[in-house]
Image (cartoon, grey):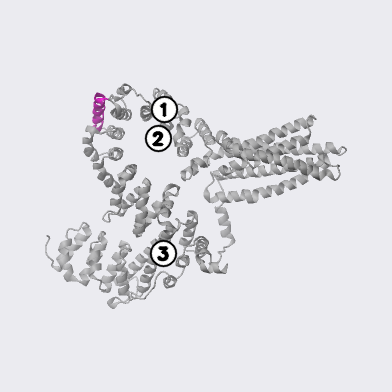
Amino acid sequence: LYYLTEKYRQAFPETAHWTDDEDDDNQEFTARKVTGPLQKYAVPLVSFFVLAEVLYVLIDFQFYSQLEYQNAGEGVSVASKIASFLGIYEGIQGLFQVGTQWFASSRLVERIGVFVTAMILPAGIAILGVLTLGSSLGQLVPVFIGLVFLRFLDELLHYTLLETVSPVLFQPIPDNIRSGIQTLVNGVGEPLSCGVTGVGILILLWVTQHILPTTDEKQFHDQQSLVFIGIIVLLSLVWLFVVWLIRSQYVGLLVKSAERGRLGVTDVDLKALKRAVVETLEQPGGEDDKRSCIELLTQIDPKNVGEVLAPILEGLPPALQRQSLETMLQHPNPAYLAIVRKLSEQSLPPEVLALALRYIWLTDAEPNIDSLRPYLQPTVDPVVRGTAAALIMRRGDRLQKAEATNTLRQMLTHKQERERVMGTRALGEADYLQGLRLHIPNLLQDESLRVRCALLDVISATHSEEYYPSLVRGLGYKSTRESALGAIVKLHNDAIPLLVHLAEDIHKSDLVRLQAWIALGEIGTVEAIDILVGNLITAWGTTRRNILRILLKMPSEVGIEGVLDRIGRSGVETLIEQELMFIGQIYAGMVDLSPVTTYGNFQAVDGNSASEPASDTAQLLQRALAGLESDATDRCFLLMKFLYPLDTVQAAAFNIASGQPSLVARGLEILDNTVDIASKRSLINLLDQHSEREKLSNLSELMVYKPLSPSDRLRRLLELRHFLSDWALACCFHLAREARWSLTAQQTLVCLRHPMGFVREAVLAYLKIASPRALVELLPRLQNDPDHLVSAQVEQMMAELGAGGRR
């Protein structure tokens, strides 16, 4: 053990255990309490397993009591007779258990659902118990025979059906507390219920001995058993009620789980869910709950959603009819064509009628095009008219297509905004734009934002490559950003080259580049993940942070698995070590530049004095470096989420970021007991509350620190300019200007071409002090700078230095 702890030190915690006062303990306990809808589900869930254990103990006790009484007074052969009976009994029961587990359990759950399956055992116990009571009181069957059947049923189903449905009942509970509730059930609830049941049995035995007549021993034992059987029947009825309570809360919790995006088809009882959804939709109540049920059903079983929604379409309010038809259109099924056709013949809102027409058109093998022509009249609502025209353009003949095209042309050039919007949306449903393509340039310049946003979807739906640049431009404007992003994502892999070019263009704004990375993440294909992971390795700073967050947010942990599949655990550890080495360079800069308040003619007396610019610029750089350290630390935590549970890493990051000593200690202990990477000790020491110099010494395994003069350290930082933020880079030049430090020509000229205007502005200010002659030669080339502040600065410097006129 000593060898292992020394050889693999990163796998073992070394920090002292965190302790806190009683108030914090109470706060922690309170924060973890189960409240609200979750409590309404958790209480009956725990009761379900407790009652199962209580009934099991009661039936088992009565079975063995009656078995012993039936064989009492037979001398030495009592034990052998009991053993022989139990051997045969347990053997037969074991065969039935194996057969039930192999051939019945899973099939029952699939056919009748989890909750009906869970009700079989308590219902069977209640029925057998009542039959035993009746037959025993009528002296038809001995009590012992009834108990034999009761125990056989309980043993048979307790370890087969009950074990099969148990995992499904825990699924709606959030992951972060599910294990705690399972531990409460298995580790506390069941053992405690056994103990309490034992005490209850002793009390009941004592009570029956004093209440029941004891003159006839056989009659006394039978009556005592009947009392126990009566209690068993009552508890089984309570158990049935508990199953009903669980079922009533099941759908509500599943809706919340679906909002977190962690449910799949295998996680839930589809039959029970569908029945619950139908009941919820048919009962009077708010539309919000019903809408959530439809969304949940769509997420769980999208292909068969029509099975539930189609029969109840006519009874739904218009808003839910629209949502249901939109959901059914994702997977149209001809089996529900008659229902939707009947619905379309009724008086419907235009939006619902348009969806119904589209569904009929997609599912009818031989659609009647002439039935759509009446909807092309100008008096028909634009939503229905546009849908009908688009459908005719798909499968109509030449004359019919011409009529539909003319209808859409009139809508696209109409004065009313709603006409143009619906006409534009209809273009996306048509297979070919044909002559209507001529209207796209005008629609892109339309005064209506809704028209422009609708057109972006049309460009995506029709794969009009010549207008893809319009999608990119749409990302740059707040008003069209969401629509442009959605349209680009619908292009899937076709949009990847466009997005990569946009994301890697350093002259684009950070916001637009971020939208490109987000679009790649939402596309989520193998090719898109390849691009994201490839850039994760080569990118730095804000770009790497954005890519990490996008990969972590991808549903079903696809991004996490994609990273681990491509670069592996060792690759992630290498990225963490890169961040730690960069933090080491930052600490080296902070340590070596800390005395920069005593240079030349601006010696610092008051650090806040406006007359001491060097002190101010030094403080600006120190703050910029501190920001870089914070960003690198955040990236370390993001990288750790690829290797360890997200909640654990997030809890550690939250506690460490608080700055309170007790919380920081807690966060460090969480990391110490979770992380096992090779650079674990360096990471934890960096996160602890030490000075920069101490943290720098703790990084000796990753980098060698050699003290440098402030000017040399600044030049060293500029050599790492690709890793610095734009603001930190500008601060380096401002400090060099104030301190009169010389920088290399390469560093200066390269940064003069930096995409950020304030960096170029800082370089020009430095050159004005450091090399006025070189600046005079450079200024004429910078007159047309795209940044207005830089161009104004150039004009001012040219006037001051007497440089040449505008070229």
Residue denoted by label 2? 330
Q: Rounded to the nearest whole Å, what is the CA distance between mark 3 and mark 1?
A: 58 Å
Checking the image for residue 334, the label placed there is 1
Q: Quadrant of residue 573?
A: bottom left
Q: Amino acid at mark 3?
A: Glu
Does the magenta stretch mainly form a helix, a strand or a loop?
helix
Checking the image for residue 165, the label placed there is none
Q: Rounded to the nearest whole Å, what is the CA distance between mark 2 and mark 3?
A: 46 Å
Q: Amino acid at mark 1?
A: Pro
Q: Residues within 10 Å of mark 2 (few under 14, many from 20)?
A: few
Residue at the right extreme of this rendering:
215
Q: Which numbered disc flags the more N-terminal residue, 3 or 1?
A: 1
Q: Position of residue 531 (x, y in %)?
A: 34, 52
The stretch in magenta equals: 397-415
Residue denoted by label 3? 577
In terms of secondary structure, where does tag 3 sit?
A: helix
Up/down of 367 relative to 206, above or below:
above
* Foreground disc of the pair 2, 1: 1
Name the image quarter holding the C terminus.
Answer: bottom left
